[in-house]
Image (cartoon, helix red, strand yellow):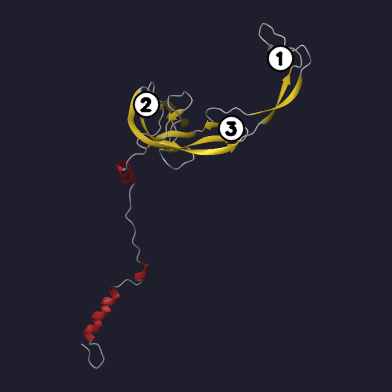
């Protein structure tokens, strides 16, 4: 107790002892996070939902496709569909030696005999061999066909002749229109000023030239380019 402004000897000794119990630098205390072992990390990965579907080249999103549609204006109006490139991926069953994957679009509104499908190598890397995807209504040997909106897919992963996984996933497809002006372009052609001479093969000889009874000459004509149904 206080006595004329002084602390009693007993309380002074008690206070001094408690002060020596404190760390020399209380601000230097570090709290470390718990150590996670590799086994725990593997268990965490196994409990996470696996990612499966189409990984679009150049896009961070899984199962979201934006397909360009080209509309041409100017002297040569026209239209052409674009493509996106994608690969199938599955975190639960990644690529491995001798594996292939078949992906089918089984959505309503697409032809079902057969369903649009792609059969791709799935033996290395993070995903399958790249496939090109475009808008359509039925199977195409060059492209995997989708429609606008939600598309339902099923897939089968095989290792040689053994099925190692089967499942389904949904992908969403939208389009974006790209407008380009197209005008006639000059083209040089060889013309026959006289009469064409027919032969047993028609008017084209074995060298691929028109047979003409006079000397041929070149002219420049302006023509519109032809547009493919699908522009790569």
Residue extending farthest top: 200
Q: Which residue is at 24% across, 82% downward?
A: 13
In the image, residue 59 sits, relative to residue 196, either above or below, namely: below
Q: Where is residue 160 in the image (x, y as percent from the top left)?
A: 38, 23
Mark 2 lies on residue: 158
> Which quadrant would residue 101 be assigned to in this image?
top left
Q: Provide residue 138's location: percent of width, then percent of height.
A: 42, 25
In x, y percent, where is residue 61?
43, 42
Q: Residues within 10 Å of mark 2 (few under 14, many from 20)?
A: some
**Residue in view at x 48 percent, y 34 percent:** 85
Local SS, label 3: loop
- Sequence-wise first label, 1 or 3: 3
Lateral position of residue 160 relative to residue 225, left or right: left
The image quadrant of residue 183 is: top right
Return the residue nearer the eye: 184 or 115.
Answer: 184
Query: Which comes before the other along the chain, label 1 or label 2?
Result: 2
Distance Cα–Cα, label 1 vs label 2:
54 Å
Mark 1 and mark 2 residues within 8 Å of each other at the beta carbon: no
Identify the residue shown where x is 54% and y is 38%.
178
- The residue under label 3 is 77
Q: Nearer the viewer, mark 2 or mark 3?
A: 3
Q: How far apart are marks 2 and 3 (CA)?
A: 46 Å
Cα distance, mark 1 to mark 3? 31 Å
Q: Residue 69 at what x, y percent from top left?
A: 51, 35
Nearer to us of marks 1 and 2 is: 1
Q: How crowded is mark 3: few (under 14 residues within 10 Å), some or many (20 or more)?
A: some
Q: Mark 1 points at which residue?
A: 210
Task: Find numbered disc 1 in the image and state the secondary structure of the residue it sits on.
Answer: loop
Q: Can residue 232 be seen in this snapshot?
A: no
């Amino acid at each position: 107790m206080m006595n004329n402004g002084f602390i009693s000897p007993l309380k002074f000794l008690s206070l001094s002892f408690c002060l020596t119990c404190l760390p020399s630098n209380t601000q230097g205390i570090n709290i470390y996070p718990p150590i996670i072992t590799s086994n725990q990390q593997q268990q965490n990965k196994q409990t996470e939902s696996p990612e499966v579907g189409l990984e679009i080249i150049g896009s961070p999103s899984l199962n979201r496709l934006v397909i360009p549609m080209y509309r041409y204006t100017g002297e040569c109006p026209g239209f052409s569909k674009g493509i996106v490139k994608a690969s199938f991926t599955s975190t639960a069953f990644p690529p491995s030696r001798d594996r292939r994957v078949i992906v089918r679009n089984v959505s309503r509104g697409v032809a079902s005999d057969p369903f649009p499908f792609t059969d791709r190598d799935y033996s290395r890397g993070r995903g399958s061999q790249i496939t090109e995807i475009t808008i359509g209504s039925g199977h195409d040997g060059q492209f995997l066909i989708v429609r606008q909106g939600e598309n339902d897919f099923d897939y089968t992963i095989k290792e040689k002749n053994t099925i190692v996984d089967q499942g389904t996933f949904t992908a969403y497809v939208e389009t974006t229109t790209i407008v380009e002006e197209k005008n006639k372009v000059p083209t040089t052609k060889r013309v026959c000023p006289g009469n064409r001479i027919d032969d047993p093969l028609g008017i084209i000889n074995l060298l691929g030239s028109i047979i003409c009874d006079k000397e041929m000459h070149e002219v420049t004509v302006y023509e519109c380019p032809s547009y493919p149904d699908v522009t790569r």
